[in-house]
Amino acid sequence: SQEDLQLLSLVCKHVGDVRHVSTKSLADELVAPNLAEVAFEGLMEIDEPKLKPQAPVCWYAGLRAVDRFYVKQGRYPGLDESSLAADASLLADELRAFVQEAGAAEAMNEALADAHAQELSRFGAAELHAVASVVGGVAS
């Protein structure tokens, strides 16, 4: 059909751009994260120092710290507003411990801040995708 020929033409036109990407399995990532190399590369790509704390690798480390918090505390940080500050402090400790154990403390030293732990605690395990879909539906 004409559509198949157009698709084949498009694939042939861009075949030089095809690359093989190998990634670790989720199980391997959870056991031995390659955070040091990823952090170094990810943060080096950002030229403006004030944008480094917003690098995806910082939020990845923060979310891994939230997982560790959950395993130790049996709940997510920030679920109870009265313990928000205490949870943020515990989460900051987990974040520093995770980054240290992953061997990325030096690479992420200037980018990580207690603000990451505070924001993740304030988030309180909210399901943003559900909230965003409702707000998107209302706004449209």
Image (spheres, rainbow, N blue to C red):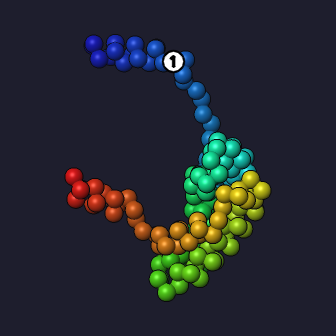
Q: Residue at x 57, y 58 (%)?
A: 59
Above/below status of 10 relative to 87: above
Please name whichever residue, 60 or 19, is drawn nearer the observer in this view of the structure.
60
Q: Could you tell me how many numbered marks the image carries?
A: 1
Q: Position of residue 21 (x, y in %)?
A: 60, 34
Residue 68 visible at all: no
Q: Position of residue 96 (x, y in %)?
A: 70, 67
Please name whichever residue, 54 or 69, is drawn nearer the observer in this view of the structure.
54
Q: Position of residue 29 (x, y in %)?
A: 65, 52
Q: Residue at x 59, y 68 (%)?
A: 115
Residue marked by disc 1: 15
Residue 93 visible at all: yes
Left or right: 57, with 103 as reference point: left
Q: Residue at x 51, y 18 (%)?
A: 15
Above/below status of 67 relative to 10: below
Please name whichever residue, 109 or 125, is drawn nearer the observer in this view of the structure.
109
**Residue type for callout 1:** Val
Q: Position of residue 8 (x, y in %)?
A: 39, 15
Number of residues whose C-alpha sits closer than 10 Å to that of mark 1, classed few (under 14), some (14–19) or many (20 or more): few
Helix, strand or loop at mark 1: helix
Question: Splitting the image into 4 quarters, where does residue 100 fall?
Answer: bottom right
Left or right: 37, with 64 as reference point: right
Question: Splitting the image into 4 quarters, where does residue 89 fall?
Answer: bottom right
Q: Residue at x 47, y 78 (%)?
A: 79
